Image (spheres, rainbow, N blue to C red):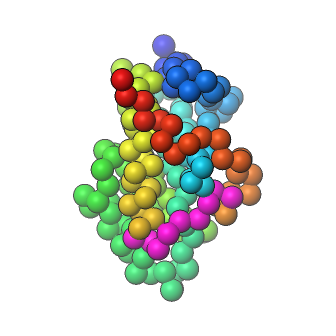
Amino acid sequence: MSNRETVEACLRELGGVRGIDLSLDADGLVAMSFESGHRLTLEVPETGDRLFGHIGVKHLDLHDGAIEMRRALELNLFGLATPAAWVAVDPETTLVTLCAVRETTGLDGEALGDWIAALLDDVATVAAVVGGWEPAAANDAEAAEPAFADDMFIIRG
């Protein structure tokens, strides 16, 4: 199976549990909006064995938000629970973003759901140090209406 086929199978499994259609677009992207206002975008390269996720948290003013920005970046030193997750700041928009990468080898729907749930926990950690968060609509003019409950990816038997 290709990288995208692996993730597509996981998305079908994950969506099937909740009765929703989850799938990648032609570019290997899927965006999920949550009731909390968070929007997770998954990016899956056609080749390789990784998938990438990112969630915009909050725009910070470069001067007035310097302390919060520093605290957010300090989370990169053992402050995040999700393995291979990090905080980044877009230099053009000053959007603080939680980013992560995960291997797709051996990935199944349950593992993908657990990874998404961990990212949502980490985004709360990031938001706490930057003084809150902005709903996805503030981060992306094309943000969809919330589609998923914040806890929908916690799928445990």
**What is the total number of numbered labels drawn onto the structure image?**
0
Visible in this render: residue 104? no
Residue 123 seen from this side:
yes
Residue located farthest toward the top when viewing the structure as drawn: 1
Q: Quadrant of residue 116?
A: top left
Residue drawn 71% across the image and 47% down it: 144
Q: Position of residue 148 (x, y in %)?
A: 59, 40
Residue reaching furthest to the left: 78
Q: Which region of the structure is painted magenta?
A: 129-137
Q: Is residue 43 magenta?
A: no
Q: Quadrant of residue 22?
A: top right
> Whole-percent x and y of residue 123?
44, 56
What residue is shown at x 62% (from left), y 60% (from top)? 135
Up the image or down, 104 lies above or below 70; here it is: above
**Residue 124 coordinates in the image, percent (x, y):** 43, 58
- Which image quadrant: the C terminus? top left
Closest to the observer: 48 or 56?
A: 56
Quadrant of res 112: top left
- In the picture as drawn, the residue positioned furthest to the bottom comes out as 64
Q: Nearer the viewer, residue 1 or 120?
A: 120
Left or right: 25 with respect to 58? right
Judged left or right of residue 101, residue 136 is right
Residue drawn at (51%, 86%) of the image: 64
- Please give the name of the residue rendered at 61% of the width and 68% of the height, measured from the top-left corner: 93
Position in image of residue 133 (x %, y %): 53, 65
- 134 inside magenta stretch: yes
149 over 70 or under it: above or below:
above
